[in-house]
Image (tube, helix red, strand yellow):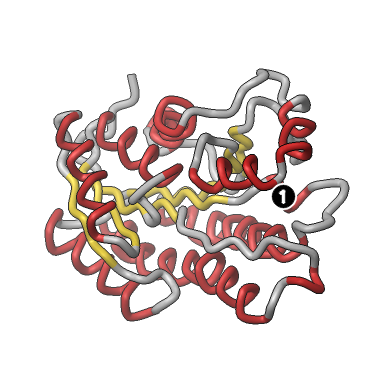
Amino acid sequence: MTDLSGKVALVTGAGQGVGQGIALALAAAGAKVAVTGRTLVKLEATSALVAERGGEALPVAGNVKDAASLAAMVAATVEHFGGLDILVNNAQEVPNGKLEDVSDEAFIAGFESGPLATFRLMKLARPLMAARGGGVIVNLASSAGIRWDMTGYGAYGAVKQATRVLTRAAAAEWGRQGIRVLTIAPHAESPGLKWWIANNPEEAEAFFRTIPLGRIGKLEEDIGRAVAALCSSDMAYLTGATIPLDGGQANFD
């Protein structure tokens, strides 16, 4: 069983969906977890679920599109728990739609909440992790960035692919400091996926037929536990990679 006892994690977008599932799995593995997001009541609900698993969580409300707010999240985590070992960059506003239908504002929001927030948080986390002998950063991407038909997914795929490039660069630059950096590309039963299914039922049905395992991932059991395993010492030689957690659907080769 994955053991993250003594580790401190910060998870963005942890009030629901994939972020919540990851936070719960990290806590179940023994990590103390700062759960961040825009809505405090959702973060408090996640913290209560962590407590049910015997873990400890710190809810920290903030806006990942604001640099000062990101710094405050990290500072609150370090002040409360004493350091930082694991960072999960999950929060993302989704600029979906055909290119002519995506506004500048939506694309900028996607960039600021995704790769720019990831860039900023990674740089805030690096010295803290290095001071503790290393750490693990997990960034979230999407198979939207490698679809053969990018119609309707160009803006979203672009910001997610930018995050993958940041992962590769950070892994190369910080590996000698003991910091591993990974990307996951999950399919999970998140609110965003449920919205997509409801609004694109025919496309969703066709998409699900391409998943070899025949189902969508469960938030905590499939996605969260995989992330916990990636953050453990058992995966100490893995860095710079994109790991699809999608039942075998995407091909990142």
* Residue type, label 1: Ala
Residue positioned 76% across, 25% down in the render: 209
Query: Along the horizontal axis of the image, is 63 left or right of 31?
Result: right
Q: x%, y% of residue 164?
A: 63, 56
Whether residue 246 is visible: yes
Q: Which one is nearer the viewer's eye here, 2 or 24?
A: 24
Q: x%, y% of residue 49?
A: 22, 36
Q: Quadrant of the C terminus?
A: top right
Residue positioned 21% across, 55% down in the render: 59
Q: Considering only vertical position in the picture, is 147 above or below 105?
A: above
The image quadrant of residue 230 is top left
Q: Which residue is mark 1?
A: 144
Q: x%, y% of residue 166?
A: 59, 62
The image quadrant of residue 78 is bottom left
Q: x%, y% of residue 173?
A: 54, 62
Q: Which one is nearer the viewer's eye here, 241 or 110?
A: 110
Please rate how many residues cluster around mark 1, counting C-alpha atoms within 10 Å: few if below 14, some from 14 to 19, many from 20.
many
Q: Quadrant of the N terminus?
A: top left
Residue positioned 54% across, 44% down in the render: 239
Query: Along the horizontal axis of the image, is 129 left or right of 147?
Result: left
